[in-house]
Every structure is written in C-alpha cells, then in structure tokens.
Amino acid sequence: MSSATDTELLALHGLAVKKAGSPAAVAAVIGAEEAEVEAALEAAVAAGRAAGAKGTFMVAPVGREWLDAQYPQAFAGFRADPAATEAYERFERINRALLALFTDWQMVPTAGGERVPNDHGDSEYDADIVDRLGAQHEKAEKVLDSFAALEPRLGLYKQRLDSAYDRALAGEHEWVSGARIDSYHTVWFELHEDLLRMLGREREEAP
Amino acid sequence: MTAVADRAVVLDGATVPSREVVGNKGRSIAWMLSLGLPVPPALCLPIEECRRFHAGGGELDDEVWSSVLAGVAGLEQKLDREFGGGERPLLVSVRSGAAVSMPGMMDTVLNLGITDTVEAALARLSGDADFARQTHCRFVHQFGATVLGADLDEPAADATPAAVREAVRRDSGEEVPTDPQEQLRAVIKTVFGSWSSRRAKAYRRHWGIPEDGGTAVIIQAMVFGNLGRDSGTGVLFSRNPLSGEPEPYGEWLPGGQGEDVVSGTHDPLPLAALEASLPAAHERLIAAATLLEREHGDVQDVEFTVEHGQLYLLQTRAAKRSPLAAVRAAVDLAAEGAIDRAEALDRVTPEQLASVLAPRLEAEVAAAAEVLARGTAACPGVASGVAVGDSEAACEAGGDVVLARPTTSPEDVSGMIAARAVVTERGGSTSHAAVVTRALGRPSVVGVGEGESAALLGQELTVDGSEGVVYRGALPTAAVDPASVPGLSRLLEWARELSPVEVAAATSPVDLLRLAQGKSIPQGSEQEEEIS
C-alpha cells in the first residue's frame, strides 16, 4: 500500500468512525495533520468516495464499499496479531461493564425492577457510578496502551476518554453519556466502531 | 463507644461518634445501635489512623494492629464465633468510610476470614457445600480485584477457589493470602492507601476537599441467611416504592444469602411469607423500618438478614422510588407531620412530576391497536412517525420519522437526533442504542428480533418506549388528569401557596413546582427530556 493511499484510507476510515465530520475532527481520531487530512478527504471526494460541504465531510456509499474492500489487506497484520485479539477481549469486558454503568447512570433502578430517569438528586448514587467509571477508565487505559503498541494512533483515544472522565469527575453530568458532545460514551462508541472495522468483526450488542 | 487499646473503636452505640472521627458508615452503624436496632457488631479504625498510616510511610504499626486483633476478638466473643477457624467460623466485611463519600476509595471486601478449613466448617454449618465454595470463590475474586488489581471475569457458579486463585495469580502475579490475619491486614492497608489513589486525589482537587482528611475502616461481622429454615435475607421498604402507598413493601428469600436477592438469581417471596414463618422477626423488622423512617423523615430501603430467627439490619438508606411514589409519599409524610410542606415540595423533582404528567397511550387505545413488534423498553415515552432505515433518510425526511435498524453505530447518532423514536433488532437495555436514545430523550424499543426492522420500513407507527411495544399507525396520546394521581392535587395546591411569586393561572404544574422550589423556569421547557 502506497503512503498516499495510506492517508486516504485512514482519513476515510476516521470519517466512517465518526460518520460525518470536519478535517479537524477526523485528524483527532487518526492522529494526522489537519491539512493532510483535508487534502486526503478532498481526494476522496474527487474519487466519489466521500461527499463534502462547508468543511464537513461524509463517507459516500461507494466509499463505504471501497473501505470494506480495503480493510482485510490494510489491517491484515493487526487482524492476525494474537495481541490484538487478546486486547479486544479485554476491551469487550470493559465494554459490557461500561454500558451497564451508563444505563445505571441514566436510569435509576427502583423496587420491582422499574427504572426511572436519573434526576441527579442523589449525589451518593452518582458518586458511586463515577467511581465505577473511574475503575473502568483505568482498565481502558491499560487496554489502549496494548492497542497503541500495535497501532499508535489508537493511543489518542486515551486523551479523549481522559478529558471526558475528568469533566464527569468534576460533576459535569452530560460528560458521562451525553450524545451531542464528546462524552465518555461518545468517544467509547467511536473507539468500539474503530476496532470493529479494523478487526472486521460484527457488533455484538449486550443483552 | 469503647476504645480497644486506644486505637480502634468498637461501634456499640453507647455513644455516637461524629462522622469526622469514624466516617459516615461508622457513624450510621453506631447511630442505629444507639436506637436499639439490631446491627451486626462492628469495629472501626478511625480516620485519625489513616493519617497516621500515611505519615508512617504506608505501614500499620504494631500498636494499631494489636488493637485490630483485640477488636476482632471482641466480635468473636459477642457472636460466639472464631475468626479463621473453628466449628462456627467468623467472617467479616471490611469497608472504607470517609466523612464525605468520594470516588476512588476501596469499597468493600466481603467474606474475609475464609480458608479451606473455614469453607469446610461453613459447609457443615449450612449443610450447603456449594454455598461455602461459592463464598470462598467470591472472596478470592474480590480480594484479587480490589486489593491486587487483577482484571477478572466474575467466577462461574461451578468455579473452585483454586481456579480463581490461579486466575488472580496469572493476571496480577500476586497471591491471595490464605492466612485470615494476613488477609485482614492487606485489606486495611488497601483501604487506607486508597485515600491517595489517583482517582480520589483528582476528585478532591475538583471539589476542593482538603488532602489531610482520610478514611475510616469498618470491620463488621457477617451474618448468614442460609443456615436453614429460620434464616434468610431480604429487603424492606417502609412504604410501597412503586405506588407510594403507606404500607411496608418487601421481598423475603428464605435460606438466601445477601447477594442472592440483589443478583436476582433466586425468586424471592413477598413479605407476607416472612410474617407467616417468622412472626417475631417480621414484627421487629416493621418496627425498625417505622423508626428509621421517622428518624430520617423519608421512605427507607432496609437490607436485612435473619440468622436462626435473629434479625439483623445490614443497611438503610433513602428509598429509590417511582415518580408516582415520590408524589404520594411526600404528601403523606407531610400530612403525617414527619416533614413540613416546603420539604414535601423539595422531595419531588420537576423531572419526576413531568414523568407523572407525561402524555401516554390510553389502555383502550393500545388494546385496540395492532402490535407490529415487541422488544425491550429502553427509553420511556411515546412517539409516532414513518419508519426509515438509515440516518440519511431520517435526516432528509425532516418530518416525523422513526429510525428502525438492525443495530446502531456512531454514524446513526445523527439519524437518532432527527428521529422521533428508535427501534432496533438487536441488543438490550444496555446497548449503545439504548444509551444514546436516553441521552437524546428519544423513546426507544430495542431487541425486537432479527429481521424485524425491515418489515417496519415505510409504515407509520407508534413506539411506546415505556412498555417496549411498536404499534401500527399514529396513535393519539392522552394527558394525565392530576386528580387521578394520589397526592398530586394537594402537592400542586401547596406549590401555589408557597411560591414566592404570583403564579399565572396558565403556568404548567412542572413550572409551578420549580417556582415553589425557588428555581427558575428554563427556556423552552417544552423540549424533550434528555437523560444525561
């Protein structure tokens, strides 16, 4: 794979993980220079693999197919590496724990199994969940270190997760699972998608 | 409180030490004992000892250690049990307990004191070798995870302690001690050490909590609910947490041990079963819950265990309740004089009131409608629209659409924002789709089954995210009549009386409550309820 295709593939991959975004947002996912990403995305638009307007790009259906065709070869080494598989298993374990805690964060269990929306009136309840988030965050950092040893750009997720965790710890509720910002869940969700694409796996949803 | 060799504190309720001395949990145990309530005996290393531990370079000195041993001997004596051996073994729980609860502190290690010999004794005592083995596994697992930082899967039901030990060794490179005293010493050091954990420090920095505080350590005897027919475990609410009715409500699991109720692995019985089989324990439990509710001025959720007919209270806290119960209990408590009207208003959040008044499908309407799919109710609420299969379509349609997909990935978030409701084929209440729809306030039903979403496309449908049902057609929703909700009319009357400003007649009940609570009315309060 030539280095030009390399950047284009990564830029388009980063765009697919985010669905739509600016060159800056994609650059933050793949750890490349913004200008370089912008040029790669412009090239992808020219090739019909992406669509762009007002500095925001989207993967085109053709680009999606192109990516799916490129993945097996582009990430052959990663897919074959037992260290990646092993780290992904640890990732899955954290993923289950995190999704359960996001659910507890949003919906408070009451007697009889019914859950009600968390109005954040019980600071002990919230502190307990932020504590669980912290415990998983520490495990996530270790897993990301393992991934970064194989694919350095994956280490970038650490900073993004850390900054979401830090704001959650400071009592900014929406940074745990808010959907419109780079909350812990948003970043984790993207990381999950990133790994699934790299490894060529199907999403398995928790029961 | 009695001092053991001056360094540990026996929590016997003779006095109630302050939370600055023994922490929140320590104070709560002493306080319940001072009310004459049955709580398993406990001792405490006060917060002062945490400071001493850190000043001493992270070591327990001989004097404090002998105070711990003397305290444990006191627990043995009180219960006629033996720590680390004997025919009637004593197991303890060890917890942290700062004056203010904070993330990053070591939480709890249960079943400490178990060894192969103790496991055998426990098996004889309970007549249940599986329980004894599982208790041993749980301890090894918990010690490995919390003290040694091992990353482990929950032990399977048929796991052996040796296998769990090996898993801990593989992951952490360290051994779980087999000597009970060594176990205890290590856990105490972990609790004190956790005061300086990265997370606890970060939390204190954010909240301006002084670094020179510390945490207490609570060492409490464990009691057993599985010692035969006159034992068991359960949970009691001082009022019904679903309806708010002023009747005790609870669950009783004869022969069950603490975790069994919480984990849902066994089906508990209603409280009446406890009343029928162990009337004295039941009577004492109800009296305790009534007393605790009066003292706290709020509905209590009490965890309890009965060991050979003897009732023990393990924990009490303000009960989580449904929005309906929040309204009713607040009004009833004020009517009974337990709290005043202003306090009653503060007990109901605007979100709870909004939920009580949220428009819903009427039963007759739902019964007459055609059900297209059923799944897990993931985000409450009702919404209608035409089903579309992907984000592009959802964003382009612009009108009322429902996003129906096999599963969701980050690229579907924009479609979920554009849609009124979401339906997915796979996943349950903790799927990404469930988390995102709640964060967006979009009613959702997840896990309707493989291939089901394609069949919905292009149809107009109604998603009931409270019940987990998808109906054909756009069904009408109906507003809730305040008079049909027990307590609500009085609550709104009090809100009007206590509101600091003149309230316009057209003010919505939720905004009325906000004004009475001294809050301002948010801009555009018509927007969806986002749960973040």
Image (cartoon, coloured by chain):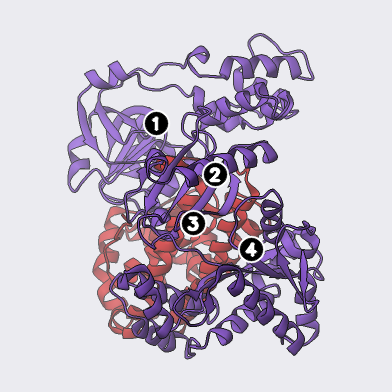
Chain colours: A red, B purple
Residue pointed to by mark 4: B103
| Residue type at the position of mark 4 | Pro
Quadrant where the image shows the N terminus of chain A? bottom left
| Nearer to us: label 1 or label 3 | 3
Q: Chain of mark 2?
A: B
| Residue type at the position of mark 2 | Arg
* Of B462 and A102, the residue lying toward us: A102
| Nearer to us: label 3 or label 4 | 4
Q: CA distance from mark 3 to mark 4?
A: 19 Å
| Residue type at the position of mark 3 | His
Mark 4 crowd level (few <14, some 14–19, many ≥20, 10 Å Cα) = many
| Nearer to us: label 3 or label 2 | 2
* Earlier-in-chain disc, 4 versus 2: 4
| Residue type at the position of mark 1 | Gly
Residue pointed to by mark 1: B398
Residue B15 shown left or right of residue B510 in the figure: right
Using the rendered image, report if marks 1 and 2 lie on a common chain.
yes
The circle drawn on residue A185 is 3
Mark 3 crowd level (few <14, some 14–19, many ≥20, 10 Å Cα) = many
Q: Position of residue B223 (x, y in %)?
A: 50, 63
Q: Chain of mark 3?
A: A
Q: Residue at x 51, y 12 (%)?
A: B483
Q: Secondary structure at mark 1?
A: loop
Q: Are marks 4 and 2 in contact (CB under 8 Å)?
A: no
Q: Residue at x 64, y 58 (%)?
A: A167
Q: Secondary structure at mark 2?
A: helix
Residue pointed to by mark 2: B284
Residue B499 shown left or right of residue A20 in the figure: right
